[in-house]
Image (cartoon, helix red, strand yellow):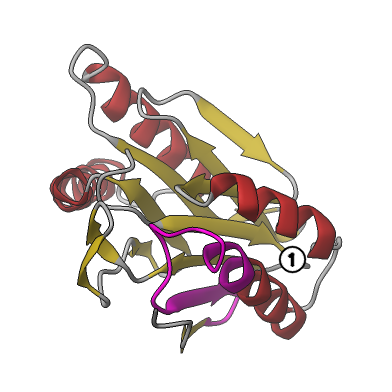
């Protein structure tokens, strides 16, 4: 889980949700690349982040893309975030005796009678889900992310405030972790658009 490094955080706002990851790909302490994205769009309103072994991240990216496409064809509708979380969980649990070394985060907006509701969840490497109402974190800077997020996050943040909060959380946490960093990418998902921004971080 620590071999390639990397950290991801997702946060809930007011009718919006944000997910951010660092961009480092390492071989333990050796940095190999500074543009390795760990967060992928599943639909227009759902993003999936995976921290852990880079080869498994790329393998599962394709596997989840295939399974989501199959779901869309069979059900004739887009997958919902909660359904995707169960799909991710069952996919990881299938391989529990020789697991994929990744920890996923699902962030998205669900359609309900009350309008768009933010949804976030994370899982461990064998698919044990953790649903949250505030924020979830995974990766090598997990402990630091939790500490900073608890200090900065507030309920009902507007999209711009949520962007600022998640950005400060990630950048400050990865500065204290040798296996994460080298910039970040942030996706803020709102009912009508997704705002994606790339941040510069410390390069040392």
Location of the C terminus by quadrant is: bottom left
Q: Please report the residue visible at 48 percent of the width from the left and 57 percent of the height from the top.
A: 8
Q: Is residue 191 left or right of residue 177?
A: right
The relative height of residue 202 versus residue 177 in the rendered view (above or below) is below
Q: Residue at x 35, y 71 (%)?
A: 23
**Total marks drawn?**
1
Q: Nearer the viewer, residue 48 or 176?
A: 176
Look at the picture and state if 198 lies above or below 121.
Answer: below
Up-down relation of residue 6 to residue 14 (above or below): above
Question: Does the magenta run of residues contain 188?
Answer: yes
Give the x, y percent position of residue 181. Answer: 43, 69
Q: Is residue 201 left or right of residue 133?
A: left
- Which residue is tagged 1? 13
Quadrant that contains the N terminus:
top left
* Range of magenta residues: 170-194
Q: Nearer the viewer, residue 152 or 41?
A: 152
For image coordinates 73% across by 67% down, the residue present is: 15
Q: Is residue 115 magenta?
A: no
> Can residue 125 be seen?
yes
Corner quadrant of residue 130 = top right
What is the x, y in percent for residue 104? 40, 43
């Amino acid at each position: 889980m620590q071999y390639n490094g990397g950290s991801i955080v997702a946060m809930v706002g007011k009718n919006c949700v944000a997910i951010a990851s660092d961009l480092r790909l390492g071989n333990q302490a050796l940095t190999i690349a500074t543009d390795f994205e760990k967060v992928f769009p599943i639909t227009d309103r759902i993003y999936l982040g995976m921290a852990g072994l880079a080869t498994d991240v790329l393998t599962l990216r394709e596997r989840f893309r295939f399974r989501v496409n199959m779901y869309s064809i069979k059900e004739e509708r887009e997958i919902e975030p909660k359904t995707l979380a169960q799909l991710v969980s069952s996919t990881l649990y299938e391989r529990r005796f020789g697991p994929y070394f990744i920890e996923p985060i699902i962030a998205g907006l669900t359609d309900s009678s009350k309008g768009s509701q933010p949804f976030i969840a994370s899982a461990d490497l064998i698919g044990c889900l953790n649903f949250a109402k505030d924020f979830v974190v995974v990766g090598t800077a997990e402990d630091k992310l939790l500490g900073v997020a608890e200090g900065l996050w507030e309920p009902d943040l507007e999209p711009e405030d949520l962007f600022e909060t998640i950005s400060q959380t990630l950048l400050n946490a990865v500065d204290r972790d040798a296996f994460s960093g080298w910039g970040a990418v942030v996706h803020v998902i709102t009912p009508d658009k997704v705002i994606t921004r790339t941040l510069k971080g410390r390069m040392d």
